[in-house]
Amino acid sequence: MNDERIVLTQDKGQSYTAQLLYLIVAGYIAHTVYYAYWGPTARIQGPWLARFTRLWELLKVSKGHFEQVNIDLHKKYGPIVRISPNTFSISDPSAIKQIYLGRTTLMKSKFYEPFGDPLDPNLFSETDIKKHAQSRKAVAHLYSMSFLVTYEGSADRCNVQLCAKLRDFARHRTAFDVPTWMQFYAHDVIGEITFGEPFGMMAKGQDEHGIADSIDETIAYASRMAVIPELHRWVSWFGRVAHLKTPFHNIQKYILEQIDSRSGSDSVGIDFLKKLLTLREDDKITQLDIEKTVGNNIMAGADTTAISLSAVIYSLLKNPGTETKLREDIDTLAAAGKLSNPVTFEQARHMPYLQACIKEALRVHPAVGRPLLRVVSPEGLTIAGQYFPGRFQGNSRYQCLVAHYNEDIFGRDATTFRPERWLESDKEKLSVMEQSLLAFGAGVRTCIGKNLSMLEMSKVIPELYRQFEFELSESEGAWMTWNNWFVKPAFECYVRLREGV
Ligand code: HEM
């Protein structure tokens, strides 16, 4: 009798639990459907599946061409499109000012969390506005124009090494993988600038220390997890508890070895790390700040510059007229004794056609291929005529390429590489174009390494075109790209030493 009663009680308990579960699932479905069709942003068009789940975005992201998907969505649905139930992409130029440059700064969304440790975010992944401002203030001067001069020697040493390698390729008449060699080059420059020594990638002709692979794996994880950032906290927690090694561990190990070897009182050099160690001695930053800052240089500083350099070379190859013009400019300045060997940043900064070529390559092929997501502030915001209520924590975002291919801003030839557009536009138009150029982001979260990268590119390109001629390898049609946050291209070319060099 007693047993029977127990069984009856258990049955009742189970059915209550099941009913509760059904209720929760039904409530969730009802809420999702209500929100999708009658919510405050229900009128915004987009793929059907994206109304209900982030799965649509995740699937598209994993196919590696999200920048193109984003452009196609705008062509189909207009200036505001739905990417997921709570995320919208905007192509109206007025939105750039509101989202990134407005008086009330919009926070970075949780999208960025997987690019760092959820418990201790880095400068890039930090979403809190105040904490970010504090961290940025502590190190911003190290990336400023006035500090750049101390990094020029690092770039010069790597330029010599790159040119020597290209001479080898020219001598053996072998096609070389341009983006990979630009990656070796850019990593070595970051190594030189940050630690006072290159990673040795150009010297060995390989990914020394496995740094580039570790970055690829870390970014591949982060760029997918960014769609479901809530999960990152759990994955990180599990990784910590189970003592799992993430790909970033390899980079961290290298960083710690470098810091350890330099922490003695007789530490020498004027590199980035030395400057950070001095700031630590003055109690202005902590050991962890050093690790995170150095980590950011490695994670964010090399691939971006390598992609942009590859974009310059590829665009010039595809537009021989512009290449001839750039070369003529370089030769004329050299003949007039206005271009030293090595080319200084000061000289390169005053070469308008060179700067226009770099800017145009950054425009047609921005290195970052996913939208720069921001959260609408609690009081809500009307963007391009659409009200986004703050309490819904809607994400709005602008994708670089969407902005850069906007024909209202850049003209009907917006998809064409034409450096002249930066030289012939009047002041007003130029200012609108500049504001729409998002290759380095915009506003308070703009790229902290922009000056460094511009220094590298401005100095190395004149060296390359003064000494070499490039030719796409015969098999090359259009280049292939893969978007994992960074849009990495793949192409090969032959290189020849110019006559008289
Ligand atoms: C051509 C080269 C580069 C490109 C195209 C580029 C692009 C960008 C973009 C688009 C952002 C803004 C991301 C956002 O708003 O979501 C950014 C931020 C950042 N970049 Fe770069 N970057 C380049 C070079 C560098 C270099 C050389 C470094 C360091 C040595 C660097 C370090 C950073 C950091 C730390 C941030 C986060 C800044 C913050 O949130 O305050 N980048 N970069």
Image: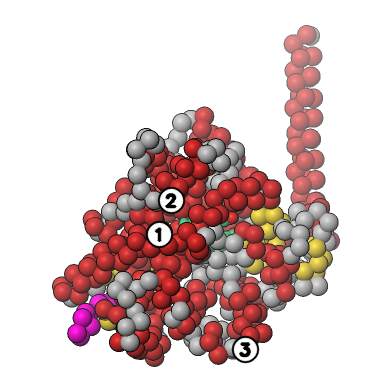
Spatial CA distance of label 3 from label 2 is 39 Å
- Give the residue at x 64% y 74%: 435
- Residue 137 relative to residue 340: left or right: right
**Mark 2 / mark 1, whichever is N-terminal:** 1
Instruction: List x then y, in percent, for residue 316.
Output: 39, 82
Residue 333 drawn in magenta: no
**Quick check: 356 above or below 246?**
below
SS assignment at label 3: loop
**Mark 3 / mark 2, whichever is N-terminal:** 2
Identified by mark 2, the residue type is Phe
Residue topped by disc 1: 151
**Quick check: 15 above or below 341?**
above
460 or 146: nearer the viewer: 146
- Residue 481 relative to residue 94: left or right: left
Q: How is the image coloured?
A: secondary structure
Spatial CA distance of label 2 from label 1 is 9 Å
Identified by mark 3, the residue type is Asp
**Which segment is the magenta one?**
493-501
Label 3 environment density (alpha carbons within 10 Å; few <14, some 14–19, many ≥20): few
Instruction: List x then y, in percent, for residue 446.
Output: 59, 62
SS assignment at label 1: helix
- Give the residue at x 83% y 56%: 379
- Give the residue at x 38% y 35%: 265
Residue topped by disc 2: 272
466 or 29: nearer the viewer: 466
- Residue 336 relative to residue 220: left or right: left
Q: How many marks?
A: 3
Q: Quadrant of the N terminus?
A: top right
**Mark 3 / mark 1, whichever is N-terminal:** 1
Q: Please give the label number shown on residue 426.
A: 3
* Quadrant assignment, res 430: bottom right
